[in-house]
Image (cartoon, rainbow, N blue to C red):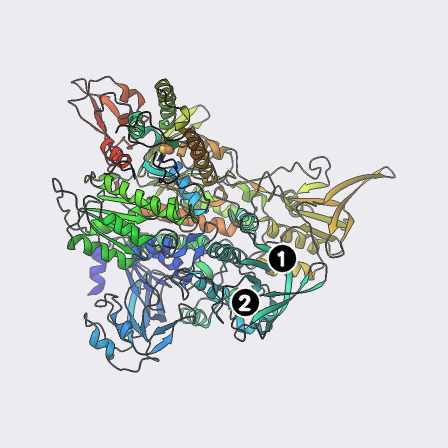
């Protein structure tokens, strides 16, 4: 590590479903709730759209953590996409842990369109968690 | 000969009105937000619309606002798309600088004379470039910025104006000819004359808005004498990024930042001394908003709001107040201010006020903002006279509780502030409602006078290398105040495939739409990115713009650098700029991979389904049926009528039960309405234009097909757990009292009645205000006094929220000796039962703030103003419809301000108490509004659906069937060769299949694997794109 380098802050990739969590993130903005500027959002139609491959790819490319957020159970705009997603990520989490990736790097949450505050809290928590883990080096391809 | 052509256009003989035929066009007077919304609804449902406004541009008061409560949305940002839509709509014609002088004819066929003042600039030629204003040597006053800034004699009223054309202020113009010489478009003509045009229309909608109260009339507050006393509208301009001080909060006298700001409420409202006995309804909220925004702009500011009652009676308003108090440190002081005096040395102001306990105080402030109310102007008085519509005693347009949209003249409707003081969502609601009323009158001539929109042939961009244009928005100072926009633009220019990047003050304004179109041509752009606000609100606008320039609308991408960047990292300028760059780069990476998609045309089933057979549901059903649409009306209970069955009189003395009976009869008699009572909804499937609902009726099931859904499930009265309710027959709720008052004469032996407000409202379990209880309490208290004048009535309240004209009855109640005692939320009254001589006596103990003591009131009857709560069924229904509820359990509309009856899911609408507690009048307006919004869909035979439908690569598919099992819509099946295929109309594009396919043989267009991974590849610092 070069000493001149700026203090490390994590980069976190967030996949937000268009109908709930993305709207919740907008609401956080509308309500001017402040949260750490470490996340970058990719809008997807539904949390069910998120292929585990996207997450592995992201970790390979040097993102330090991933957040996938969708509608609450039962509220998915496409009925059950979020439940499938949850199952999928439970498996993925185990797999990544097996590969030595700390489970805190992969986060899943439900945030509704009315939960601006919750969104801000989730981001804060995830950032804290990943910060504590430090940079993700394990999968990074150089 | 004209009449023959008209007859050819419409063969239906029942359309004849006694003189001439019905005409399929409508005149809207006033181009504020109300006028704009009604014009758009009408134009979208098949009518030609003329919007007449007396100023040089549409937009009204809302265009002057900085932010709007309770969401703090930037006013211009949410208004601008509507301005643009209105300005560019083929069937809306805007006549500025115009006023209505005369009408003749009758409902269905009016002739209207309109006088148009010259603007000396040809709208058709003016490009709004502003060269003329640069050269104009004469400084004239800028009335839009409330005289706080000078402007030139040739001017536009605001940068986003529609139409964007300059105008010459003849009084200031010296006729030097400079502007004419420099104008490249040759748009200036000094010789233009006043014009008179005659419009032939079927109906008229009045949306003229009203003026703010003239603060000079209350001389004790020093407005006009002291430079640092400003009105709330002036302060709004001070706050605005496009205002006179570019959003810097400063004192007019010396440009210093004021530390202490006082807001004085009720200036020209609730004040019989100036003839305005009503409450202006919006001032408490806008003052709070201005205080919050001022704080946001400059953290050293300490705002104080001096008020009498805090009227936060709207949806989510109380939460806003709490936030203002706790997060922004806004101080709320309940007292009356008697005088404002200037301290001559500093030009600061000394305020004298009296608190509740009667003590006098003095305090110094650096700036005073007068929260002025609203009053009808002479212009609207003249308008009413010219049109022959009646006004009420305050000079507002006269309407009746059950007919809130109708004026005294048939065929002339009203919406917005002109009929009573109201906020933006209510104005927008009424605007839509007025459109539905017109639809009822003119449905038979719908579509006779309109033109259809044609987009240019789509350019074929396939195979071309991407040429991306990036438009970065300042959004006033919403983005530009936090993010370094020029550096984001410079950065965008360095990104691969970007051939053009620029910054805009407001990317959503109509002139920027033209800029975007021009740049597309100029630079041969084939992908466009706007970095600004949320795609959820603004994507459709920009998509239409690029479509007008010949690009497929899917060649567009947004970077949300406001809602998800500048607004949430307000104090981290550098990090926010960094993030904005990242977001832009991610958008660029995705844009390079975007492909054009075709939109699918879907048939629309021209039938409506309404859930809930209460007041709102029935009104909506009739509003649809009377526009010629078949309608299903579903009620879970055996009887129609809902909550209205409990209401027996109104403040204004009307008879709701008679109205209800009549309404039920009309619903039953209408052959287009099919009512289902005592039924349950089992399932709702489908999408806009094509819904299918399964209902269960005893053991029978039926399936109904329809194109839209209106949710009107109503509200219920809370069953109190507090104040020993249900433990004593003398402790009852407000609606039980009303029931008793209507059936039995209240006994004159009743010595004293104590009414307790906010039971179950504004507390931890229901943090919202139920809005109607204050009016209801006063109504019933007056009724008791009427029946038994000797009975003493006490009302224990927290804030009396008798907004609008209801204030008059509050005044009357006090005159009649009804006693109002304010209590504090943490010192709630207590109901005490005591046994004396074998008789149980009842009393209420409460802290009296004026004398500063705990007092005890004997009560023969204790009445609890119980909250309005959402029905339990909302949760299940919301799930079935896949629409959200708010935290309190009411349905959450698409946008609190400008889409008050829509959901984000197309084709579903909400009205009445299902949305939030509201009065009869407001429920009726909203029901009409929902019907109007629904009609914009039902009148079309086909609508465009999203083009995002899963695609399967048959060569890669192994036929494993995973997608078939997972697809929530059964849209995937196996074909004869054993591979999966998609039924396009069933697919909703969720992408679940694509994410699960082991062969990665499925593509979700617009969200393809490639597009998404290209976004995530673009990570700053580690990997370059
Ligand atoms: S739409 Fe939000 S998770 Fe499916």
Res. B465 image quadrant: top left
| Image-quadrant location for residue B1019 | top left
Mark 2 neighbour class, 10 Å CA radius: few under 14, some 14 to 19, many 20 or more = few
Residue labelled with disc 2 = B393
Q: Which residue is label 1 attached to?
A: B333
Q: What x and y, as percent, mark residue A8?
A: 38, 37
Quadrant where ligand 1 appears: top left
- Secondary structure beneath dot 2 equals loop
Task: Using the image, determine if residue B173 lies above or below residue B918.
Answer: below
Q: Mark 1 near mark 2, Cβ–Cβ under 8 Å?
A: no
Q: Say whether residue A20 is visible.
A: no
Of B528 and B79, the residue lying toward us:
B528
Where residue B563 appears, x then y in whole percent? 39, 46
Residue pictured at 43% horizontal, 31% vertical:
A110
Q: Sequence order check: which comes first, mark 1 or mark 2?
A: 1
Residue lying at the far front in this picture: please name it.
Answer: A3
- Badge 1: few (under 14), some or many (20 or more) residues near its Cα, within 10 Å? some
Q: Is residue B166 above or below residue A113?
A: below
Q: Work out how far the residue at label 1 is from the one at label 2, CA to CA, in angstroms.
A: 32 Å
């Amino acid at each position: 590590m070069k000493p001149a380098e700026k203090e490390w802050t994590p980069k976190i990739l967030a996949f937000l479903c268009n109908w709930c969590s993305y709207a919740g993130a907008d609401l956080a903005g509308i309500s001017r709730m402040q949260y750490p500027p470490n996340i970058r959002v990719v809008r997807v139609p539904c949390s069910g759209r998120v292929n585990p491959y996207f997450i592995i790819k992201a970790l390979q490319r040097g993102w330090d953590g991933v957040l996938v957020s969708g509608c609450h159970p039962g509220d998915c705009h496409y009925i059950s996409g979020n439940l499938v997603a949850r199952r999928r990520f439970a498996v993925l989490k185990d797999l990544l842990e097996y590969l030595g990736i700390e489970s805190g790097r992969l986060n899943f949450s439900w945030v509704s369109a009315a939960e601006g505050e919750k969104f801000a809290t989730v981001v804060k928590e995830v950032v804290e968690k990943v910060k504590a883990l430090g940079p993700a080096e394990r999968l990074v391809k150089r | 000969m004209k009449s023959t052509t008209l007859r050819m256009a419409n063969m239906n003989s029942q359309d004849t009105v006694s003189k001439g035929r019905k005409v399929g066009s409508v005149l809207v007077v006033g181009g504020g937000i109300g006028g704009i919304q009604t014009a758009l609804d009408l134009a979208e449902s098949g009518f030609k619309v003329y919007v007449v406004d007396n100023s040089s541009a549409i937009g009204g008061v809302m265009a002057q606002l900085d932010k709007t409560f309770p969401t703090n949305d930037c006013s211009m940002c949410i208004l601008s798309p509507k301005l643009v839509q209105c300005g560019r709509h083929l069937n809306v014609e805007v006549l500025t600088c115009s006023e209505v002088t005369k009408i003749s004819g009758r409902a269905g066929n009016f002739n209207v004379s309109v006088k148009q003042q010259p603007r000396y600039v040809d709208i058709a030629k003016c490009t709004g470039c502003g060269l003329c204003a640069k050269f104009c040597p004469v400084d004239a006053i800028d009335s839009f910025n409330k005289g706080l800034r000078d402007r030139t004699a040739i001017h536009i009223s605001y940068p986003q104006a529609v139409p964007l054309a300059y105008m010459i202020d003849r009084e200031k113009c010296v006729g030097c000819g400079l502007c004419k010489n420099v104008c490249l478009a040759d748009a200036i003509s000094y010789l233009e004359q006043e014009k008179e045009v005659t419009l032939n229309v079927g109906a008229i909608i009045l949306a003229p808005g009203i003026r703010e109260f003239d603060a000079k009339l209350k001389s004790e507050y020093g407005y006009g004498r002291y430079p640092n006393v400003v009105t709330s509208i002036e302060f709004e301009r001070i706050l605005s990024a496009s205002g006179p001080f570019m959003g810097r909060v400063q004192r007019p006298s010396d440009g210093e930042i004021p530390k202490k700001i006082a807001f004085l409420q009720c200036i020209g409202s609730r004040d019989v001394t100036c003839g305005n006995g009503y409450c202006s309804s919006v001032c408490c909220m806008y003052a709070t908003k201005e205080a919050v925004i001022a704080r946001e702009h400059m953290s050293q500011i300490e705002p104080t709001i001096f008020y009498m009652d805090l009227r936060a009676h709207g949806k989510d308003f109380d939460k806003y107040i709490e936030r203002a108090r706790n997060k922004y440190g806004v101080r709320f002081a309940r007292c009356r201010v008697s005088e404002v005096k200037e301290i001559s040395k500093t030009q600061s102001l000394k305020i004298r006020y009296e608190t509740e306990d009667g003590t006098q105080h003095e305090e110094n402030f650096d700036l005073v903002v007068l929260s002025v109310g609203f009053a009808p102007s002479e212009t609207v008085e003249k308008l009413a006279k010219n049109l022959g519509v009646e006004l009420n005693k305050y000079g507002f347009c006269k309407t009746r509780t059950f007919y809130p949209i109708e004026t005294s003249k048939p065929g002339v409707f009203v919406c917005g502030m002109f009929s009573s003081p109201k906020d933006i969502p209510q104005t927008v609601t009424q605007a839509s409602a007025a459109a539905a009323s017109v639809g009822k009158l003119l449905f038979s001539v719908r579509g006779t006078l309109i033109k259809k929109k044609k987009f240019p042939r789509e350019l074929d961009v396939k195979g071309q290398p991407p040429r991306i244009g990036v438009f970065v928005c300042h959004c006033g100072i919403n983005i530009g105040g936090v993010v370094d926009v020029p550096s984001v633009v410079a950065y965008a220019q360095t990104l691969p495939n970007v051939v053009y990047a620029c910054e805009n003050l407001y990317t959503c304004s109509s002139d920027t739409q033209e800029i975007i179109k021009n740049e597309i041509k100029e630079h041969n752009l084939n992908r466009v990115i706007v970095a600004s606000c949320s795609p959820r609100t603004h994507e459709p606008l920009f998509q239409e713009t690029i479509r007008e320039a010949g690009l497929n609308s899917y060649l567009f991408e947004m970077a949300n650098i406001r809602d998800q960047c500048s607004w949430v990292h307000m104090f981290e300028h550098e990090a926010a700029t960094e993030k904005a760059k990242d977001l832009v780069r991610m958008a660029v990476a995705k844009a390079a991979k975007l492909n054009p998609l075709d939109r699918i045309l879907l048939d629309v089933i021209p039938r409506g389904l309404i859930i809930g057979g209460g007041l709102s549901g029935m009104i909506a059903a009739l509003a649809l049926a009377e526009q010629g649409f078949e309608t299903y009306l579903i009620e879970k209970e055996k009887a129609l009528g809902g909550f209205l069955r409990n209401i027996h009189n109104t403040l204004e003395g009307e008879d709701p039960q008679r109205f209800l009976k009549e309404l039920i009869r009309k619903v039953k008699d209408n052959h287009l309405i099919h009512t289902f009572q005592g039924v349950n909804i089992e399932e709702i499937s489908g999408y806009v234009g094509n819904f299918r609902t399964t209902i269960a009726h005893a053991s029978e099931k039926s399936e109904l097909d329809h194109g839209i859904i209106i949710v009107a499930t109503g509200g219920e009265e809370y069953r109190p757990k507090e104040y020993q309710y249900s433990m004593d027959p003398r402790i009852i709720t407000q609606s039980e009292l009303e029931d008793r008052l209507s059936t039995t004469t209240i006994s004159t032996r009743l010595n004293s009645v104590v009414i307790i407000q906010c039971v179950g409202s504004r507390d931890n379990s229901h943090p919202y205000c139920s809005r109607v209880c204050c009016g209801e309490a006063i109504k019933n208290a007056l009724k008791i006094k009427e029946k038994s004048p000797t009975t003493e009535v006490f009302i224990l309240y927290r804030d009396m929220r008798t907004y609008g004209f209801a204030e008059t009855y509050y005044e009357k109640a006090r005159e009649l000796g009804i006693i109002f005692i304010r209590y504090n939320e943490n010192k709630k009254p207590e109901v005490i039962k005591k046994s004396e001589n074998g008789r149980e006596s009842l009393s209420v103990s409460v802290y009296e703030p004026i004398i500063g003591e705990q007092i005890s009131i004997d009560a023969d009857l204790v009445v609890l103003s119980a909250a309005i709560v959402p029905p339990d069924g909302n949760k299940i229904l919301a799930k079935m419809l896949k629409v959200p509820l708010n935290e309190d359990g009411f349905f959450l509309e698409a946008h609190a301000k400008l889409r008050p009856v829509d959901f984000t899911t197309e084709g579903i609408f909400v009205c009445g108490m299902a949305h939030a507690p509201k009065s009869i009048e407001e429920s009726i307006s909203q029901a009409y509004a929902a019907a109007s919004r629904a009609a914009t869909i039902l009148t079309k035979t086909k609508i465009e659906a999203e083009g995002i439908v899963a695609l399967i690569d048959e060569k890669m598919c192994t036929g494993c069937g995973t997608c078939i099992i997972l697809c929530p819509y059964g849209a995937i099946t196996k074909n004869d060769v054993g591979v999966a295929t998609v039924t396009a109309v069933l697919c909703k594009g969720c992408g679940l299949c694509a994410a699960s396919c082991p062969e990665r043989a499925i593509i979700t267009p617009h969200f393809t694997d490639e597009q998404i991974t290209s976004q995530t590849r673009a990570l700053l610092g580690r990997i370059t794109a």
